[in-house]
């Protein structure tokens, strides 16, 4: 029975923004009345024009705010789309959630409203937190996650140091002869 009721009255959003200043009741009220949607799982290469093309099918768009890596100022896989009416935002969540954009299933949810500063990623490296801990390779989101990428770079440095300069740059015999077949 609980599952049936949750389908009738779904939660306003599955994500709770810890930086929202206010009570849970005010947060829920903001979600119920907001004309802003959060779009996640975007490719780092998705453009604002592509987003406009897809999201304008749900209604008239007031503004698109691309999520940025706060250090590099490059897209980092999310955005906010602000509509003029709540009905358009509702249609967007209802009909576009799960749509493929740049070969990625995007996630769309109601947002309590855009405020300046929210366009920046919250991860330690400047991007999104989820991208820091991703263990799989995702070309659309910059390759491996930041933590794994740093670990791989450290391992590569250690292997280079342990090899004792066995590469061409450090081996005078290879550099002088110019061939690697006898190596």
Image (cartoon, rainbow, N blue to C red):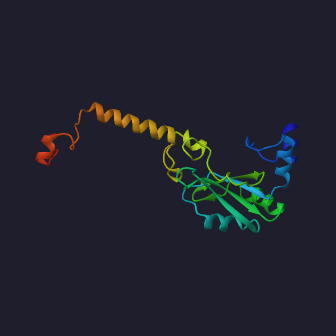
Image coords of residue 67 (percent x, y): 62, 54
Instruction: Locate the C terminus by quadrant.
Output: top left
Residue drawn at point x = 86 percent, y = 45 percent:
26
Residue that sits furthest to the top in the current view: 162
Q: Is 3 displayed left or right of 99 in the figure?
A: right
**Quarter of the rendering containing residue 160:** top left
- The relative height of residue 93 versus residue 15 in the rendered view (above or below) is below
Q: Is residue 158 visible to the viewer in this orientation of the structure? A: yes
Q: Nearer the viewer, residue 99 or 20?
A: 20
Image coords of residue 32 (percent x, y): 85, 52
Instruction: Locate the N terminus by quadrant.
Output: top right
Residue drawn at point x = 82 percent, y = 48 percent:
12
Image coords of residue 92 (percent x, y): 75, 60
Q: Is residue 10 visible to the viewer in this orientation of the structure? A: no
**Quarter of the rendering containing residue 73:** bottom right
Residue drawn at point x = 61 percent, y = 59 percent:
101
- The relative height of residue 49 versus residue 8 in the rendered view (above or below) is below
- The relative height of residue 36 versus residue 163 in the rendered view (above or below) is below
Q: Nearer the viewer, residue 117 or 145?
A: 117
Q: Nearer the viewer, residue 92 or 122?
A: 122
Residue drawn at point x = 56 percent, y = 46 percent:
126
Image coords of residue 17 (percent x, y): 74, 43
Q: Is 120 displayed left or right of 177 in the figure?
A: right
- The relative height of residue 12 versus residue 183 in the rendered view (above or below) is below
Q: How many marks?
A: 0
């Amino acid at each position: 029975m609980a599952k049936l009721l949750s389908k009738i009255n779904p939660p306003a959003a599955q994500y709770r923004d810890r930086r929202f200043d206010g009570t849970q009741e005010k947060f829920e009220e903001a979600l119920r009345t907001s004309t802003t949607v959060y779009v996640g799982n975007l490719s780092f290469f998705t453009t604002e024009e592509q987003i406009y093309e897809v999201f304008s099918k749900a209604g008239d768009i007031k503004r698109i705010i691309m999520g940025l890596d706060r250090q590099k100022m490059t897209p980092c896989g999310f955005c906010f789309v602000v509509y003029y009416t709540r009905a358009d935002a509702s249609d967007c969540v209802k009909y576009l959630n799960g749509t493929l954009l740049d070969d990625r299933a995007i996630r769309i949810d109601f947002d309590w409203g855009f405020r300046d500063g929210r366009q920046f990623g919250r991860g330690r490296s400047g991007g999104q937190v989820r991208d820091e801990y991703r263990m799989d390779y995702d070309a659309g989101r910059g390759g491996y996650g930041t933590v794994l990428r740093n670990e791989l770079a450290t391992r590569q440095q250690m292997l280079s140091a342990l090899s004792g300069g066995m590469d061409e740059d450090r081996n005078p015999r290879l550099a002088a002869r110019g061939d690697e077949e006898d190596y």
